[in-house]
Amino acid sequence: MKHARVACFGSIHEAVADDGKLCLADGRIVDFDQVVWLPPLEVGTIFALGLNYLDHASEISVNLPEEPLLFLKGPNTLIGHGGFTRRPAGARMMHYECELAVVIGKKARAVKREDAYDYIAGYTIANDYAIRDYLENYYRPNLAVKNRDTLTPIGPWFVDKEAVKDPMNLKLYTYVNGERKQEGSTKDMLFDIPFLIEYLSSFMTLNENDVILTGTPKGTVNVVEGDEVVVEIEGIGKLKNTIVADSIFAR
Ligand code: MG
């Protein structure tokens, strides 16, 4: 089942995919272009992986991490499918990152990898934008690079885990203005999903609706105002958004 959250008819609705349309929780059927798409769940803590694909690590010229390189993203960064992502004036390098987002389904503490999938509710897609200009050169907390408003489009669908047979073997793609720029497979993650759940839950509690962004493969290139960016994951969906300038936000 594919679930969404949308705004239409003056309020917010839970919805499910229904033969190319949306079926709202109250039974009304609407077209995709009749709604504003919201993040498909009310997201808790957002964990993001740096350098979790071998080819992307080599692309940005760093040594491979020996343990997961994790940081947090705030809820201010989230926007839904079809939204706008802000490119600050003067930025020289802003790139997308197509990522499988793992949604935690229940409280998790000290989970062993063989039990990890029991703690997953499902999956969605995130585009973990980075503005490289703001990378700090020593401590690298990724705050100014990754935590600006609108830098995490997510959705359009939350897909139940039962509908994703092998999350560690899914194709990922990114298209900029219709041209394919990025391609990879989740099978090339350095630290796989069970490892990440075991690792995180070894020192902190994970809760329902926490989300783990699992990293991106090679093929991240600069995007500019006006670009339409689509990140796609096999079996999960296609998440579209548009790069806009500061002037759209009027502040
Ligand atoms: Mg990322």
Image (tube, rainbow, N blue to C red):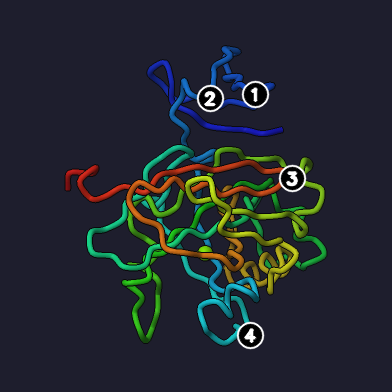
Using the numbered discs, state the Cα–Cα distance from disc 1 to disc 2 in whole angstroms: 8 Å
Residue 161 bears which disc, if any?
3
Which residue: 65% across, 55% down? 172
Using the numbered discs, state the Cα–Cα distance from disc 4 to disc 1 in whole angstroms: 43 Å
Does residue 114 appear left or right of residue 57 in this picture? Answer: right
Badge 4: few (under 14), some or many (20 or more) residues near its Cα, within 10 Å?
few
Amino acid type, mark 1: Gly
Foreground disc of the pair 1, 3: 1
Disc 2 target residue: 32
Which residue: 35% across, 46% down? 226
For marks 3 and 2, the one nearer the N-term is 2
Furthest residue in direction top, as rendered: 28
Which residue: 82% across, 48% down? 165
Disc 4 target residue: 66
Residue 20 bears which disc, if any?
1
Q: Secondary structure at mark 2?
A: helix
Q: Look at the picture and state if 105 lies above or below 52.
A: above
Amino acid type, mark 4: Glu
Foreground disc of the pair 3, 2: 2
